[in-house]
Image (spheres, rainbow, N blue to C red):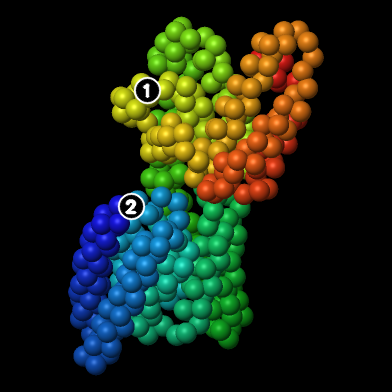
Amino acid sequence: MEKGRKKISILLLLAEFGVIAFGCAGVLLTGWVLQISAYELLADLVMTAAGLAITGFQLRQAYIREELDYNNGKHPFRFWLCMCVGLGIAFICSFLPFGAWPFLTVFVMTSLFSNMGTGILSSSVLLLIPLMMSGAGFPYFVLYFVSGCFAVTLFRHLEDDFKIGIPLFLSVLCLLLCETAAVVLPANAKPDVEMFLIPAANIIISSILLLGCLKLFSSAVIYRYRVNYLEINDTENPVLVRFKERSRDEYFLCIHTAHFCELIGQKIGADTDILKCAAYYHRLGAELPALMNEQKFPPGGREILTEYLSRKPPKHKETAILSCADLVVSSVTKLLRQEGNKPVDYEALVDSVFRKLAEDGWFWQCDISMREFEIMHRIFREEKLYYDFLR
């Protein structure tokens, strides 16, 4: 695993050199078209190369330390593709009016496909290119830096709930305020409609580009495996239908386990698609590895099921939830069969299960917090009416 990461780091270094070469070539071409003096062009080249090299170093450090957001650690080269797009935008901006640069999208794009720090650093480096090439003043750097950083902050946690309406509105509003402060007010003239034409055009273009970027991000990252999970988690899936016909009791145990997994996942922010997948199939035992390959299980569900089948203390939150749900449902079902129609103290049973888990230190290596553990405990204690369905 370590050798694989080192190999990827070397490939990232090569990608970095390629982007630096592309950036320098773009600076030379842009400088030639704009007829920039040789000394100024040399300075622009040095600054561009240095900025891109620092960005590459930051990305490799984040990759090695596993600090990249979302699943970017598994796809680090997407960032360099974004940088190529960002360089293209930066070169085009060198020919546009200062207030018409769509850098809001660049800040959000580079951050989504890396992490917050790397995105802000890389976007700032890209922003310097049109600033140097066009001679725009420092207020324009502040304009795009402030509005870009604000947008990055708003769009930072899209994996929790992919709602972009309010963040998009606030980002555009911040851009409008910054454009007014940097473009309109310094004009030393009475504001009129014409003065807002360029800022308005930038807002429209930035909004369209940002929506396209978010659409691409949702397809590539957030909902990449949504269709797969819809098919796998469908109770009419042929595998689950055969499982039900073969072992009705085991099948319904999985259904009840999935109910609790989904409920808990929604409460503590775990991935409910992965949880339902793991809950539906975790009782298939030895046939599960071959089934996961046959049905093309997404990496998340495959990882949790593999960890669960290992019978080792879990490391992932989803595995901990699955283990607890399976243990509680199995314990309740077993007790109900023993007691028949006699009343059962569900709360005492749940308390004993969680007390044993705590005493055994089963979750000490897991990334689940004590607060989340207590929320799980409380949910199982409060679901007394649901347990009657297990009779």
> Residue 341 placed where, x, y %?
76, 7
Tell me: residue 14, above or below residue 381: below
Count the numbered circles shown.
Answer: 2
> Residue 117 placed where, x, y %?
46, 68
Q: What separation in Å lies between label 1 and label 2 (alpha carbons)? A: 31 Å
Q: Which mark is residue 75?
A: 2
Image quadrant of residue 23?
Answer: bottom left
Type of amino acid at the residue the image marks with label 1: Ala
Please indicate, yes or no, whether residue 57 appears anywhere in the rendered image: yes
> Residue 382 placed where, x, y %?
75, 30
Please indicate, yes or no, whether residue 81 appears anywhere in the rendered image: no
Give neighbour class at mark 2: few <14, some 14-19, many 20+ (Cα, 10 Å). few
Which residue is under mark 1? 286
Label 2: which secondary element: loop
Q: Is residue 238 left or right of residue 166?
A: left
- Label located before the other in sequence (1 or 2): 2
Q: Residue furthest bottom?
A: 39
Type of amino acid at the residue the image marks with label 2: His
